[in-house]
Image (cartoon, grey):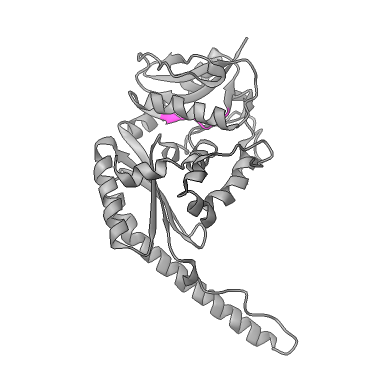
Amino acid sequence: MTALYLYAITDRPEAPVPAEPGLESASLLNIPHQDIAAVVSPLSTTEVLPAEDNLWRHEAVVEALMADRAVLPVRFGAVLASESAVLAVLATHDANFVASLDRVRDRVELGLRVLWDDNQRPATNNAQRSSSSSGRSYLLARLEEERQVRTWRQRAEALATEFHTPLTQLAAESTRQVLATPRLLLTAAYLVERDRMAAFQREVEALSAAYPALRFLCTGPWPPYSFVTATVVKADREERKDAYV
Amino acid sequence: MSELVAKEKEVTLLDLLDRILNKGVILWGDVTISVADVDLIYLGLKVLLASVETAERMRSPAAAQCSTVNEQGETF
């Protein structure tokens, strides 16, 4: 019995699999269930290392599928025991998968990072406790530092909102994070209709010109990884409680 | 495709890793017989992804020569 490596859940179960080779250069297989399918390939081992060539191979398969069907990309490294195990997953989560596929059909993910100048960040940890200063003055200095950081963060939020908002208007869904690090003003992902991709890119270029002090890094189109993460398939036993810290 | 997006696609390994190791449909527990132990690697990469230096490096052609990440999260 060979194990099966899983790449994605798709619609159009009747569509032939792409010629794209999978991991171990194996051919892809479609495992259909009503209106959806799981795309897998046979694996001679039960463990898959996240080495670079495996990662790119996995991504190439998902992108090939994306060309002609709606796709829920599966996180790297999922290995199932058999076809019946795959069918059990599809049957159990059919409604969930169909709803997610409806949300991403004909849409792509575009990623954006916006960098700003780090010396806008207020210096912190300058309030030093020394024997000569009183505890009170130390605390006051710390409070002032925190007030400055709060103001800085609010400024970042306001600025990020200025250009995130026009982009959300071109997207069906979006995610965003402000100040993941001091220089990363915005980290965002946008779920955009395929035929709106050009308009989205033009808007990013226009924003880049309108904010010359900021650097805009746009990547894509990606399969909609950031918009299907909520779909998590668990077993009855909570074996991986420690997985997410 | 516009120049802005095409240029950045050259250096997308870290953007790929951010997605493929941490997002998408996640299966765990009895349904899988193994799951690549990506969580620790991802935690290490999270720092890398967020760093400005990485974003700076991303713009250079040299960054397009990708390194490999092993199970301990080390790059070489």
Residue located 42% across and 30% down the image = A72
How many numbered dots are placed on residues in this image?
A: 0
Residue A114 visible in the shown view: yes
Give the left or right position of residue A225, taking residue B1 as reference.
Answer: right
Q: Is residue A24 left or right of residue A162?
A: right
Does the magenta portion include B48?
no
When asked about the image quadrant of residue A237, the answer is: top right
Please report the bounds of the magenta region as a residue range: A72-77
On screen, residue A8 above or below B67: above
Q: What residue do we see at 50% from left, 16% from top?
A: A87
Where in the figure is residue B20, as x and y percent of width and height? 51, 36
Q: Is residue A74 magenta?
A: yes
Position of A18 relative to B59 (above/below):
above
- Residue situated in front as seen by the camera: B45 or A205: A205
Quarter of the image for residue A84 reads top right
Image quadrant occupied by the N terminus of chain A: top right
